[in-house]
Amino acid sequence: MKRVSFLLFAASVFFFNFSNGQDLSQWPKDTLDLTNSAATTATLTVEEKKLIQLINLARLDGNAFMKRIAIPYIKANDKDDDDYVEGLYSDLKKTKGLHLLKPLEALHKSAAHHAQDMGAKGQLGHDSSDGTTFVMRIHKFHKPVSVSENINYGYSDAVSIIMEMLIDEGVPDHTHRHNILGKTFNHVGVSIKPHKMMEFNCVMDFSIE
């Protein structure tokens, strides 16, 4: 991974058979209210709002997230012996009390633009179909600050999306995981759209301000 003023990363493509039967009722209501930072964002779908809430639940208490979301998901997909999973468990155990990520409309617009672009054309990756880099694209919608981006293919439900990004299989530096659980970014925008080749794609954009 190369770091200059921006964080670069890879996209994740995974397909597992998982019944998304988990709900969030295992958390206290005050915790759910606190972490639901996108509750009043009218431009987001129910799953997009839930995805941001799951990010915040993981950041607030990694151990609780591991027990209530990660372990059931991983067991359902027979991933218990995966080295990436062991690394995820280790990182979640160390995650506690991080600041919550707030939704930002400019980042949502950037994510939605890319998800729609890639989905309609059946393309993969962070560059736009016209060759625009992800940094240039985000800065068209937002100001020129430090940014990063996660992409997942094949899922439309929030639990599967966040879990595949957190497991981050095939990404040696775990960039997706670090974007979600790290201290660098303060704002997030997400978009889940149909994809011509992969059925669905989710774009998650981050910025420091």
Image (spheres, rainbow, N blue to C red):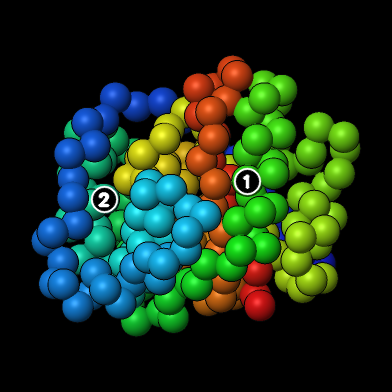
Residue 41 in picture, x, y percent from top left: 47, 63
Q: Real-space Cα distance between discs 2 and 1?
A: 27 Å
Q: Answer yes or no: do the residues labelled 2 and 1 have beta carbons within 8 Å? A: no
Q: Camera-side residue: 155 or 192?
A: 192
For the N terminus, give its image quadrant: bottom right
Q: Secondary structure at mark 2?
A: helix
Q: Estimate how packed mark 1 is, as few (under 14), some (14 to 19) or many (20 or more) residues with alpha carbons within 10 Å.
A: many
Please name the residue that numbered disc 1 is placed on.
112
Is residue 42 toward the left or the right of residue 10 in the image?
A: left
Amino acid type indicated by mark 1: Ala
Secondary structure found at label 1: helix
Relative to the observer, which residue lies in front, 91 or 181? 181
Image-based side of 2 in relation to 15, left or right: right
Q: Residue at x 53, y 28 (%)?
A: 194
Name the residue furthest top: 197
Residue 56, compared with residue 15, is above or below; it is: below
Q: Against 201, is 91 above or below?
A: below
What is the number of the mark on residue 63?
none
Name which of mark 2 and mark 1 comes first in the sequence: 2
| Few, some or many residues within 10 Å of mark 2 (<14, 14–19, 20+) | many
Q: Residue at x 67, y 25 (%)?
A: 120
Task: Assign the C terminus to one quadrant of the image.
Answer: bottom right
Dot in front, 2 or 1: 1
**Left or right of residue 16: residue 145:** right
Q: Which residue is mark 2?
A: 70
User: What residue lies at 25% left-to-right and 61% top-to-bottom?
Assistant: 65
199 vs 177, nearest the viewer: 199
